[in-house]
Image (cartoon, rainbow, N blue to C red):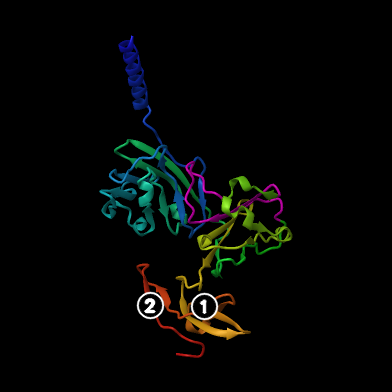
Amino acid sequence: LPDLFEFSYLSILFKILFLLSLFPGVLTGSDKPIIAAPGDDVILPCRLDYQEDLQDHSVEWTKVEIKPDPYNVLCYYQFRQIVTEHMIPSFIPRVSLDQDGLKRGDVTLKIRNVSLQDEGKYSCFIPGKNFRETVQLVVVGGTKRKVSEPIIAAPGDDVILPCRLDSQEDLQDHSVEWFKLDMKPDPQGRIPFVFLYWNGQPITKHMIESLIPRVSLDQDGLKRGDVTLKIRNVSLQDEGKYSCFIPGKNFRETVQLVVGEFALQVLPHMKNICPEQQAGNDVISLFQSQTESELQPWKHPRLTSSPLQIQEETGSGSLRCSRLNFCGGN
């Protein structure tokens, strides 16, 4: 009897393994199109429906509409690195995979600074698994995305991220979506909202849980075409680029939030930092502009004037020290 039981058990086990071999798993992407505006960074989700290390596998991302000339590969991963020799030149500096994601079976592609020409259907392929998934990217060319000046804050501050129509139009019956652009999709391929306003109210079940009690829109502002977002008690983790989108108006605006003890983050066109005393409070003024003659100060009364160094962005994205100018100094 024990031998018969053992035989039955092994027989069932082999049948289960055989069935599993027929359905080895699939790649999952996004059922809905990924919508972006020119200049946005986008995430094209593609992952196994189970966790497996893919660092030693090849991964190919292609744009379906592009015929090989000589290549139609926009991201080619092999031997644990991106192989640029086989990639479309215009994509080489703009695409990347997440190395930590590869360890978990996630080959999601990031494309920076998309243009209207990037719109189309993208295919993700893992040759060693014979898995393929497609994702649709829609680049909206309507109202051009606006870029606001960076919002600078210290941990614990309440901040306002501005977003408004040029015309005063009642938006209470429109949907409003706020995203954080560096957020990764969840296991279902969805990117959670920072704030989602729909049918006259916030829809919290689709929002980032840690932000739900801290974010709000002004109802009176909505009546005037203003969908500015307020975030209370910001932390270092809140830093990043935020996107405001009104689907019914095809309107998008982005704003950069910088959070730091001294707000000494790498900012475009940073010229100098000027500590000064004002009404008994230490103030750091961040001057940024395209030219020296157009310096615009950013002041924050909660920041202290400890010894400072300026850090500027180089072409490669690394950091270097630059000159330190005091008020009225050289």
Judged left or right of residue 128, residue 161 is: right
Element assignment for label 2: strand
Q: Which residue is mark 1?
A: 286
Q: Is residue 179 magenta?
A: yes
Residue 131: which numbered mark, if any?
none
Report crowding for label 1: few under 14, some 14 to 19, many 20 or more residues within 10 A (C-alpha): many
Amino acid on which the number 1 mark rests in the picture? Leu
Picture coordinates of residue 95, whole percent (x, y): 38, 55
What's the distance in space between the residues labelled 1 and 2, CA to CA? 15 Å
Tag 1–tag 2 contact (CB < 8 Å): no
Element assignment for label 1: strand
For the image, the number of numbered tags is 2
Of residues 93 and 203, the one nearer the viewer is: 203
Picture coordinates of residue 64, whole percent (x, y): 39, 44
Q: Is residue 25 magenta?
A: no
Secondary structure mostly seen in magenta is loop
Residue drawn 30% across and 12% down? 3
In the figure, 96 relative to 329: above or below? above
Q: Which residues are magenta?
A: 171-200
Residue 129 picture quarter: top left
Amino acid on which the number 2 mark rests in the picture? Cys
Residue 321: which numbered mark, if any?
2
Q: Quadrant of the C terminus?
A: bottom left
